[in-house]
Amino acid sequence: MKVTIYTDGACSGNPGPGGWAAVLKYGRREKELSGGEAETTNNRMELMAVISALSALNRPCDVELFTDSQYIERAINEHWLDAWKRRGWRRKDGELKNAELWQRLDELLRTHTVTFSWVRGHDGNDYNERCDALAVMEREKFANNV
């Protein structure tokens, strides 16, 4: 099964209230997912969008995933994730932030065949713009409850 996924995260302050969102496309069907946290970081929200989208798939899939996070795209495509894993979930120069999320993502990447592509954010891509709008909406929910 071939699925296309777009993801985005948003955070006001770092840390601060944040939101994440994903749009999953399979054939003509689309599904939107979103959520957030009251005290988080942008990188956590970007990771949660990817993890939540891949976790929503109920069987192994071939996935084309688009993210505007160069950090996530490069971590996969430049094999940083593999190096962190070999080092016991540490970076060359010390602690790996959000190690538990990277570990969850690593597990999901063993279930699904995923191609990661970077898309420029806020540049007219309809699905990226939709993810951004949903992530910001989630962020605002948490910002207004503080």
Image: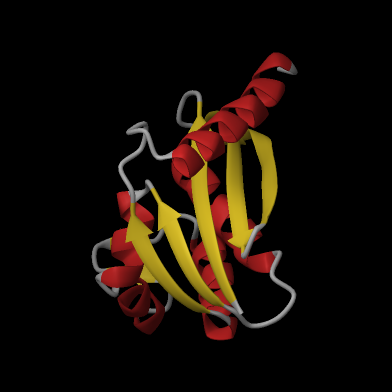
User: Residue 106 at x, y = what percent?
Assistant: 51, 75
Q: Residue at x 64, y 83 (%)?
A: 60
Residue 91 located left or right of residue 143: left
Return the residue nearer the eye: 63 or 139.
63
Q: How many marks?
A: 0
The quarter of the image holding the N terminus is: bottom right
Residue 23 located left or right of residue 63: right
Return the residue nearer the eye: 67 or 84.
67
Q: Residue at x 36, y 73 (%)?
A: 84
Q: Quadrant of residue 135?
A: top right
Q: Residue at x 74, y 75 (%)?
A: 58
User: Residue 8 at x, y = what percent?
Assistant: 49, 43
User: Residue 134 at x, y = what percent?
Assistant: 61, 33
Q: What is the basis of the colouring in this image?
A: secondary structure
111 to 120, vertically: above or below: below
User: Residue 140 at x, y = what percent?
Assistant: 64, 21
Return the residue nearer the eye: 45 or 55.
55
115 to 74, vertically: above or below: below
| Residue 94 is at least partly visible in this image | yes
The quarter of the image holding the C terminus is: top right
Q: Quadrant of residue 53?
A: bottom right
| Residue 41 is at least partly visible in this image | no
105 to 18, vertically: above or below: below
Q: Residue at x 69, y 47 (%)?
A: 33
Q: Quadrant of residue 105?
A: bottom right
